Image (cartoon, rainbow, N blue to C red):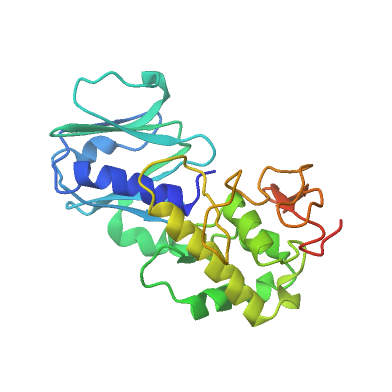
Amino acid sequence: MPEGDTLARIAAGLRPHLAGRVVTAARARVPGPRVDRVVGATITEVIAAGKNLLIRLDNGLELRTHLRMHGTWHRYRPGEPWRRAAGLAVLVLEVPGAVAVCFDAPVVELFETRAEAIHPSLGRLGLDLLDPAFDADRARRRLRATERAPTAIGVALLDQQALAGIGNVVKSEALFMERVDPFARVADLDDATLDRLIATARRILVESSARSRGPERVTTVDPVTRRPLAPGPLWVYQRAGRPCRRCGTLIRSAAQGSDLPRTTYWCPACQNADR
């Protein structure tokens, strides 16, 4: 599932071609929202909010897409052949000089911007780690909320109602970099540890979102030298059964979470989590 840094890069890529331009045509997969209501309106903003892409218009309407595992956004020049089959398009927006196409996203919504605060997902969204006004103290308090106290930190970090934008890659990498047991309960971690985890996850997302080219997956760096790791870009993610880059112990993996189990990768020696 694309993480917050990927959505930030998508928004940054679409924004110069959509913002300030009038929508001349719009269509969505049927059944779907009546996106013809945005035709004639001017796009005012293209932003990322956690793992959501939001396109706001001057007629008070707003489009939201959530890409989940397989969704993507493409931009084309008018008349340019698409790189994917038209039947996979779930939303198409045409403006002078550009065509923006969303493929395979399971969530495409159209609603009034004024209703964003009571939207079932956006209204409960936690603090976005890529927000320039991000408040680390508030983020820690959200993470330490009573209802999350018995939750494993590897699950809590993915709770978008606590912190918005962290996905499975950043979760596993940040936990490793800070030597935290992914199965430790939030209640058993002190504030300093939570602060380090939040700061490291945010640093990974900020650095990755700033890259305009390259793979969508984040690249983590050495926390001391700030240089990218060699020979590979990641410490533990998708490296189960391979030696830890720090100590040589074999990386392990296991599913975490009950509602939507996600695979966590960790070093049982560096993170003191030999499960």
Coordinates of residue 103 in the picture (x, y in percent): 41, 30
- The quarter of the picture where residue 210 lies is bottom left
Query: Between residues 70 and 189, which one lies in front from this camera angle?
Result: 189
Coordinates of residue 136 in the picture (x, y in percent): 49, 76
Query: Between residues 64 and 246, which one lies in front from this camera angle?
Result: 246
| Res 112 visible | yes
The answer to whether 106 is drawn above or below residue 122 in the figure is: above
Coordinates of residue 231 in the picture (x, y in percent): 61, 43
Which residue sits at x=35%, y=38%? 33
Which residue sits at x=57%, y=67%? 224
The answer to whether 86 is drawn above or below residue 124 in the figure is: above
Query: Between residues 9 and 112, which one lies in front from this camera angle?
Result: 9
Query: Between residues 183 and 21, which one lies in front from this camera angle?
Result: 183
Q: Which image quarter holds the N terminus?
A: top right
The answer to whether 46 is drawn above or below residue 183 in the figure is: above
Q: How many marks?
A: 0
| Res 258 visible | no
Coordinates of residue 46 in the picture (x, y in percent): 28, 50
Which residue sits at x=44%, y=57%? 207
Q: Which image quarter holds the C terminus?
A: bottom right
**Residue 158 relative to residue 273: left or right:** left
Furthest-right residue in view?
A: 275
**Residue 193 relative to residue 217: left or right:** right
